[in-house]
Amino acid sequence: MSNVLLVTGVSPQAGILSTAVQRLRETGAQVYLVGALNQDEMAEDLRLDGVCALPTDIAKDSPTRALARQVPGERVWSRIRREPWAREQARTADVLVALDAHAVYTVWRFAQRNRSADARYGIQAAVQALTDRKARHGAGPLQRLANGIPSTALVRQSVNRLISGAPRAAVNAVTARPIMRSKAGTQLWLTALKAPKMPDSVRTKVARQVAKGMAWADRPDGEAMVLTATASKLRKPAARARMLGEAASRELKAGVPPRDLDGAVEALLKVADQRHRADENVAAADLLNRAMTLAFDRVLHIDQLTSPLAEDPEGFIAPFRRSLAATTVASPRGRLQPAAPPPTDRPLRLLIATSANDNFLKLIRSYYDAHPGVEVRFVDLAANAALKSVTWASKPMLEHRLSADSTAYGDKAEERLRPYLDWADTVFVDWCVAPAALFTMVDPGTTRIIVRLHSYEALSRWPYMVDFSRIDDLVFVADHIRDLTTTLVPYLKGPDGPRMHVLDNAMDLRGFQIDKPAEARFQLGMVGISQVAKDPRWAIEVLRLLRKHDERYRLLLVGGDMNPNVSVASREYLEAFNRDVREFEADGAVRRLGPTNEVPKMLSDIGVIISSSVREGCHCGLMEGAASGAVPVVRDWPFFAGRPNSARTLYPDGWVIGSPEEAVERILATTATEEAWRAAGRDASAYALREWDWSVVQHHFDRLLLES
């Protein structure tokens, strides 16, 4: 005689349950039931051999926070597993039956403990299982799918049937969190997804379902493994490339560098090249866009303390240099006419353009607004509806380049930019990002094009989408940024490349000269902590070491915190930084002053200004601090340390140090006495004003903009 255990997640109707029990008993089985059951409605002649009736709301009830996060099937399991009677019946049952979708997961869990039992969904399937058992005369357990409750062996063997034939509840059951969190569950699905002779469409469908389960289980590594394993078995190159890209994207979304970024990027580029050769440029643009989006994701370059572009720039971009599609996009188109010299009979018409970031333009604009020899217009492409829609449209831009500059999008860009180009003698585009790519999509006529590249852009995709043959002058804020950019874009060093200049940012440093109180001598400061690249944890380590010598030292942090919603990587860094800060905030050793429009006032209390960044263009906050008379302590920015140009060539001897321990030595030496500290501060202020104040830098801009 066989034993059957029925499991319910919601209370069944009495008549239906009675019929089900009767059909099972007709096969000679003993029938037991556990789960949600309304005993008041249960028929008296039900003739169950045993019952464990639980509340009817077990699938919905969530008395604890942990249960509230679970799906109904997991709640049913959490409740039933606490019943010793139910566990005992499950161990001895020959057939385990889920009567509703919410019971599927519980039956699957019981089946993992009782491998000899058949697990079924629904009464018809259960009756068939009993019939089959009789036919086998005691043979081993039947390892196959029956209405959706799979055994481990079955999942390996019949994924096609599982996905195409099973109820969604069954599929969800075998991708639930506890299964996906286990090593056995992960290995089970990896094996299943590599099964031979499975259609690509089915394999892809399975992979996405399993990836959802991994995501629900907080397993981004598992998501990537599942999708990568699936990609290795897909027959069509385009499907394989997209799946590899999706795997890498899932890891980036979780804030971790992908394990096979190179493989995903190269696969996408290979198919993009094939599509481009076939003149299928919409598809080629989409694939190239995916490759660029992955390769230049901020998690790799912006929200980490290092970047593959810093470690091996040429090696990192080599796949793009080998790609036909990528090189077609970056190939120079040239301009039909050379730029005209500045006019001599009227003011120079200067168009200043940016997109949502004019932080480094305010002083330049005010100066040339008042200049008698210049007529200024300013356009923020993000604030102009007609221009905004074409500015950051990366896929249409790529398609235009791939289609020999002949698309409706290109016509629209030409139409909307031409009035600006026709008016201006010179266009100054700040930031070498989307606006620079847009302005170089169209022939500029005789208008001179100047683009300024700060530092962030060198770590982005945009230098590979800008036509530098249509730029007359390319401005960098520092030599080390120029060096990195020309390594990444060799055309810049060729005979047809634009003229290159290094011009300091426009800063009114005279307004930062401040008389500091004596107690500022022991106050360290940082201005700007809103990015991972600022690495304020390094400054905390300096403070920790410094206070072992003298507990009078404090650290003031000026500026807003990092945005935890930018990426998982940023959020994780911020959480670690907050833990560090709390260690010192209790006794006032660290104070967060928040964002301010009165930086000079804040600097009055700072006697030592720290640059703890891993990379910078020129670090305006440090320069402003030096101008105020604070002693500069500059970390040898790791992105550029040891190169011909770096922080050591940008700043004077003695300012730059290589480790927290060296920083402590410099701080102790320069603040040993009030006289020594004030003398070091005066020297720093004099240097900053002599080199970087707008009264000096404006002459460089005049030569750039006004002279032939």
Image: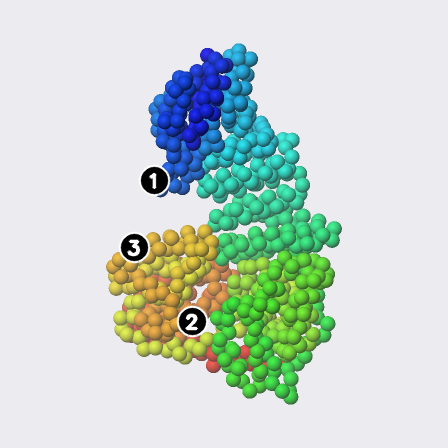
Q: Nearer the viewer, residue 480 or 114?
A: 114
Distance in Å between CA atoms under marks 2 and 1: 54 Å
Distance in Å between CA atoms under marks 3 and 2: 29 Å
Identity of the amino acid at label 2? Met
Q: N-terminal of the two: label 2 or label 1?
A: 1
Residue beneath the point at 55% across and 71% down: 380
Q: Closer to the camera: disc 3 or disc 1? A: 1
**Residue 470 sits above or below residue 98 on the image:** below
Q: How is the image coloured?
A: rainbow
Identity of the amino acid at label 3? Glu
Q: Closer to the camera: disc 2 or disc 1? A: 1
Q: Give the labeled residue for mark 3.
A: 583
Task: Provide residue 263's location: percent of width, then percent of height.
Answer: 60, 45
Residue beneath the point at 60% across and 64% down: 389
| Residue 461 in view | yes
Q: Helix, strand or loop at disc 1? A: loop
**Whether label 2 touches label 1, CB < 8 Å:** no
Residue 321, quarter of picture: bottom right
Q: Give the labeled residue for mark 2.
A: 623
Residue beneath the point at 59% across and 38% down: 205
Q: Closer to the camera: disc 3 or disc 2? A: 3
Q: Give the labeled residue for mark 1.
A: 64
Q: Helix, strand or loop at disc 3? A: helix
Task: Provide residue 427's location: percent of width, then percent of height.
Answer: 61, 75
Q: Nearer the viewer, residue 123 or 236?
A: 123
Residue 458, quarter of picture: bottom right
